[in-house]
Image (tube, coloured by chain):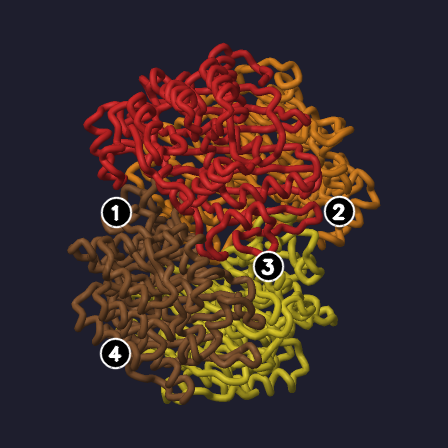
Chain colours: A orange, B red, C brown, D yellow
Amino acid sequence: MAMIGGGPGAFIGPVHRIAAELDREIELVAGVFSSDAARSRAAADIYRIDPARAYPDLATMLASERQRADPADFVAIVTPNHDHLPSARAALNAGFAVISDKPMTATLTEAHALAKAVSASGLPYALTYTYSGYPLVREARARIAAGALGPVRKVVVEYPQGWLAGAAEGKQAAWRVDPARAGAGGCIGDIGVHAFHLAEFVTGLRVSELLADLGTVVPGRMLDDDCAVLLRFDNGARGVLLASQIEVGELNGLRIRVYGEHGGLVWRQETPNTLLLHHGDGRTEILRAGDAALGPDAARRTRTPGGHPEGYLEAFANLYRDFAEVLRGGTAPLLPGAADGLRSMAFIDAAVRTSAAGAGWTALTI
Amino acid sequence: MAMIGGGPGAFIGPVHRIAAELDREIELVAGVFSSDAARSRAAADIYRIDPARAYPDLATMLASERQRADPADFVAIVTPNHDHLPSARAALNAGFAVISDKPMTATLTEAHALAKAVSASGLPYALTYTYSGYPLVREARARIAAGALGPVRKVVVEYPQGWLAGAAEGKQAAWRVDPARAGAGGCIGDIGVHAFHLAEFVTGLRVSELLADLGTVVPGRMLDDDCAVLLRFDNGARGVLLASQIEVGELNGLRIRVYGEHGGLVWRQETPNTLLLHHGDGRTEILRAGDAALGPDAARRTRTPGGHPEGYLEAFANLYRDFAEVLRGGTAPLLPGAADGLRSMAFIDAAVRTSAAGAGWTALTI
Amino acid sequence: MAMIGGGPGAFIGPVHRIAAELDREIELVAGVFSSDAARSRAAADIYRIDPARAYPDLATMLASERQRADPADFVAIVTPNHDHLPSARAALNAGFAVISDKPMTATLTEAHALAKAVSASGLPYALTYTYSGYPLVREARARIAAGALGPVRKVVVEYPQGWLAGAAEGKQAAWRVDPARAGAGGCIGDIGVHAFHLAEFVTGLRVSELLADLGTVVPGRMLDDDCAVLLRFDNGARGVLLASQIEVGELNGLRIRVYGEHGGLVWRQETPNTLLLHHGDGRTEILRAGDAALGPDAARRTRTPGGHPEGYLEAFANLYRDFAEVLRGGTAPLLPGAADGLRSMAFIDAAVRTSAAGAGWTALTI
Amino acid sequence: MAMIGGGPGAFIGPVHRIAAELDREIELVAGVFSSDAARSRAAADIYRIDPARAYPDLATMLASERQRADPADFVAIVTPNHDHLPSARAALNAGFAVISDKPMTATLTEAHALAKAVSASGLPYALTYTYSGYPLVREARARIAAGALGPVRKVVVEYPQGWLAGAAEGKQAAWRVDPARAGAGGCIGDIGVHAFHLAEFVTGLRVSELLADLGTVVPGRMLDDDCAVLLRFDNGARGVLLASQIEVGELNGLRIRVYGEHGGLVWRQETPNTLLLHHGDGRTEILRAGDAALGPDAARRTRTPGGHPEGYLEAFANLYRDFAEVLRGGTAPLLPGAADGLRSMAFIDAAVRTSAAGAGWTALTI
């Protein structure tokens, strides 16, 4: 694996590195870790790779790696959003498979362009919608698909954070509140899109309409930092999506509740190893990672026995495990790809546009 | 106290009786427990009151009680919503103070009429917005009023239930889904209005605008059973109010989260004796009923030492304790009255009307 | 009901009053609320009873009440432990049924004397082991009796409190650390005995042997304030009983865990409306008050629908409801009586004696 | 790193591999993964290492690795307990540093022999008492050391599991119930010793006396599977240590509660990213991984921002990070070593011997 982005001070770069390598199927060997050549070289130390493979720019890396006997097999893109399209396109054009941090691109237009490039290349392309890698999220999806709740009627997905309640300080915060780097969506593109993907992933439904109300709470901010979106799904189910980055004290409180005609379930990211399941007959079950009652989707994605907590890095690694399977020529139907990316970008785009216009209910197409 | 409603099979009548009598300041002595005279008489047994004071109809009760040397001092109205106005008006006209189950009336027009009657009578009138009686709800209100969170920016209040996910069976369910008895609001009038009151009570703010999306999920139902309402408060704060009666497995999950510039708090009705308080400096506190750290509003409203759980009946009794204080000539500034009732009815009315019309953002006046 | 004890400043007296009256089957009408006649009279106001029936001493009360046309039917004893025997005996001798706060008496010898008096009187006698009144404790007992766990192998019952971690100040604390009023047991007699009763109540087993290690942690204290007791039950099951009053920050954390050959369950007093049930096949259920899955023992002992929390007062009231049933000539097999009281006193006695002697494992007889 | 043990079907071998490699400071390059040469070779595939370095036996590995230009720097021992001494001694003698799974050895006598060998070698030696690697365990230790609770008075440490409630089936279970491979302790040596280490680690105190009651609940089992141990610490504090493997439904429920003169704290392994802190003034705080309020010991041992859960593998990796620091010539004062190993073995030995003898309180020396 070669990395694009993830230089000194980065959060998500090291996460990708750990996740990719956790199962020893993948090894980080090269990278353009910063647009600053000196900083890129400095990262060789951080990641403990051959300094000669810490390249000054993407073109050099792609050219050099192609000429090696043991080139990287794929690139992982962990830059801010505005760089996702150019980097992914260049890598695909040079014959490298791509796994990219979400969202797919900075704009919907770019996403269409990238989807075309992926399709033209015939190469694997994946997006790290991390939360779909949690074993109990996969269990939730499998249970709903098997009819445990009956037809889904209602979805509530929330993603509260509080770290941008003040002025956005530090490298992580700065680009997220800058339209030039983040794209048109702030909170909606940073975390709302995770909630959107999770809702479709878990239910197997698609959002067909939405009504968005995006707010900018912190004075002087240029992008949204607090979002409420009402949803309709293609089977008629009703939904609510809330995401915020100004809820002081909230860390990373993503959670989803799904209700059907005869059951309900609740999953919370901050206690990811349990899943609450309400049966229509008045019984409530707690499903726990490691329980004998869990299905194969969840069981195959845990690395420790029940009661030995797994978390964010392990969920992330599950996506890389899926990606490795695809690179080996297998399939990984649950791994998010270009189609998911396009839908997500269409969601961000529709939410931002219609909220600004006060447009009320709007169809979500693609 | 004399009761109107609460006959055999009732849920809220016995709750009012227990709550009223818990502190031994009030005693149930009379009632019209049913519009069916025989059933009303039968209730004398259930409540263990003098059978002679289990009256066949309201007019008889008011007339008879007025002639007694030891009449009831006030009436408690626990009938379905459509009866609230006529009963309350009759009681006030006959010189009896009134405490009524929420909502104030079945319609906003009726609420105006009742507010006028209350005002004209000069008599005490209270509404049992039960959840405002919990000690830690009062603590939450006091903390926010004292600036613990800074200016409030965001409110999320949710009220999930699941008991009407199927066909509405039984006495409790039947009138709630019947517009003739419940009024124009279903879920919004039954529980959404509790959430609305709680949000205003805890924050001390007023909702100035709303955008409502009320749905009827169960086929054939005539009233809403699933509600999402976006809110703006008079200080510019953003809010979300969710209420549902079709979320299978949810019991009575009312909860509220409030975030200000430098703090946040979370309270959940099903674990009512704790309050989570996020400080802006990264500390999180759990406030517990009975802790030395609690303020007087909460401390005076608990009856047991910390760790001895109190619940719904005790919260309800706190409203009756306030009401008793008013009857004795004192004041109870936190006890909901006609003004709260009017605001709540305006909220229901606006939500129902604008949702039906797809009207988008609407001002909430009164 | 007539009360002995419970004067100004008392905690448990008002609790008995509320609990007794909650279902309107019982009414407090008389009492000797203090050994100080003036204070006893003052309590008439607190309890809102006829001042003429707030008596200066027990003999006067018993004599006076016997001569009334409408005498109290029974006495409730809520004094410190050393008074339980004389008060109960006097009441029984005067023909009054008795319900008493636990423990039965201050010493085992006294308990034998009282058991004899109860038996001789032929009158109802009950002990308020409060926690056996919680609906989900009764559910736990019923499930175990029905074999849900298989034969019980292991019991862990804990009762942590922290309020006596410092010097014992205030009326509530003072008598509990005074051997002359509390008896030979401090923490073990105040709360350890609740844990003991709960363990036998829930499992239906009897402790046959124990090894006690009682400590006095706070310097200068004369009674134990921190207890560990190892248990063996009559079916061979192993057990651990922990009780402490010096665990800073703990409020009233009674909890019990029971494990059988093919299941386990967990109940916690501070969240009393749920019960965790582990099935041997790897499924875990949460049973909630109000769920359709609950048995009749629990269902009959709840007063509100699921999700409307009930607590300590309601649990306490369930014992009075049982007692009322007995007074009416019915039966209440789950209501603790003299036999439970004797066992509990034998437990306290054995724990105190053998701990002091370093005696190791000791049989618990009676 | 070279591994001893961890062949096909192993649990803890892969855990060590992931933990060691998580920070890319260590790489698994060689191993004797099984005493069966063919199985050892097969493991090269599982771990994706050079097949030539999957050795048939320990002597071959040590000899071969010593002759390489790029030998392994240390060995990780992940075999059953009876193998810990011979493997560690051989490795040390051959000049390899050692990190070993706990317990140190199968018997106390062996532990003394190994301690001598470690000391003679002058090489780094570490033991993976995993739970001491959790960031919030380190925070707990730091808070207590800084006096947050005042002098410690009481410790309750529990380790409930249920997976050996039935017949012990499978590779993981089989050796743990076999005295020839596990040593004299069953549950006490497998998990009780973790609880013991955690108690001393968090409090900074030493157990000076114990009273052990080890039971064998499952018929036919040869080692203990349910343990209760009463403790005294060197400062006079009282303690209770419970460990069980027959508590059906419990997964890996290690938790510790510590109380001092003016504070208390609670940590639970299954929700490892929070720590409850009771202040003596009635305030209760929740400390969360990632909070600004956390000290450097905890902060340096987290890899993700707050709210992105970390778990068992990350805690384990923290020990390897400490070990890497030692290998580089630095220090890691919190990393368990031979002294901890000896104390732990003395604890197991004393518990097993005195329980069998019914010996009551016994000093714990070393």
**Mark 4 or mark 1, earlier in chain:** 4
State yes or no: discs 1 and 3 in contact (Cβ < 8 Å): no
Q: CA distance from mark 4 to mark 3?
A: 42 Å
Are callouts 4 and 3 both on one chain?
no
Front disc: 2 or 4 = 4
Q: Which residue is mark 1?
A: C300
What x and y, as percent, mark residue A265? 41, 38
The secondary structure type at the circle numbered 4 is helix
Q: Which mark is residue C113?
A: 4
Front disc: 4 or 1 = 4
The secondary structure type at the circle numbered 2 is loop
Front disc: 2 or 3 = 3
Front disc: 4 or 3 = 4
- Mark 4 residue type: Ala
Q: Residue at x 51, y 60 (%)?
A: D269
Chain hosting mark 4: C
- Mark 1 residue type: Arg
- Mark 3 residue type: Gly
Q: Which residue is mark 2?
A: A9
Is B297 drawn above or below residue A115 in the view shown? below
What x and y, as percent, mark residue B260? 67, 37
Q: Which residue is mark 3?
A: D282
| In the image, farthest residue toward the top | B357
Chain hosting mark 1: C
